[in-house]
Amino acid sequence: MRSKLSLVLLLCSAAALAQTSGLRRAAILTHDVSVPGREAMVARVEIDPGAVAGRHTHPGDEISYVLEGEVEVLIDGEAPRRVKAGEAFIIPAGTVHAARNPGSQMAKLIGNYIVDKGKPLASPAP
């Protein structure tokens, strides 16, 4: 039951972030990991051309691989970084960041998140 509740919380928080940004995140798998109180989520992520996933944080690490298109990763305090198909990026837990699709085709990613159980997958940042 707790695993289902965690999945619902993760998806609701992701949906709230995505509604205004042209970002869609669909959970493929959510499962406990060896660290107590943490779980892993594997998700399919799509970002529309020109869309921005606004500034947000995750309660754990994000490890993403770009399948198609490209993404500009915008981490507070760092220069923007373009990540193209076949490349990956890591965002440490709690890091304020955003993502933008600068291309003319949809960007498709596989997002892997190792997060605190029971917390929203993403929270908007001020």
Image (cartoon, rainbow, N blue to C red):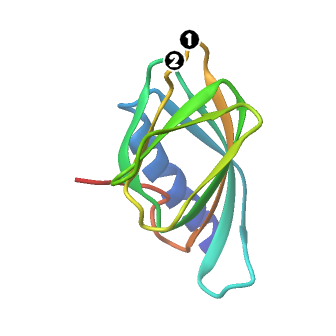
Front one among 109 and 17: 109
As drawn, 41 above or below 107: below
Q: Which residue, as the protein is rendered here, is positioned at the far front? A: 79
Question: Mark 2 falls on what kind of element?
Answer: loop
**Taking 82 as reference, is 35 above or below it?**
below
Q: Which element type, helix, strand or loop, lies under badge 1?
A: loop
Residue 23 visible in this rendered orientation of the protein: yes
Percent position of residue 115, x then y: 57, 69
Find the distance from the CA under tag 1 to the CA under tag 2. Answer: 5 Å
**Looking at the rendering, which quadrant does residue 7 occupy?**
bottom right
Taking 61 as reference, is 32 left or right? Answer: right
Type of amino acid at the residue the image marks with label 2? Pro
Q: Which residue is mark 1?
A: 104
Q: How far across and down, in percent of the image, does residue 123 sit?
A: 37, 56
Q: Is residue 124 left or right of residue 34?
A: left
Q: Residue at x 29, y 54 (%)?
A: 125
Residue 96 is situated, as x and y percent measured from the top left of the image, at 37, 56
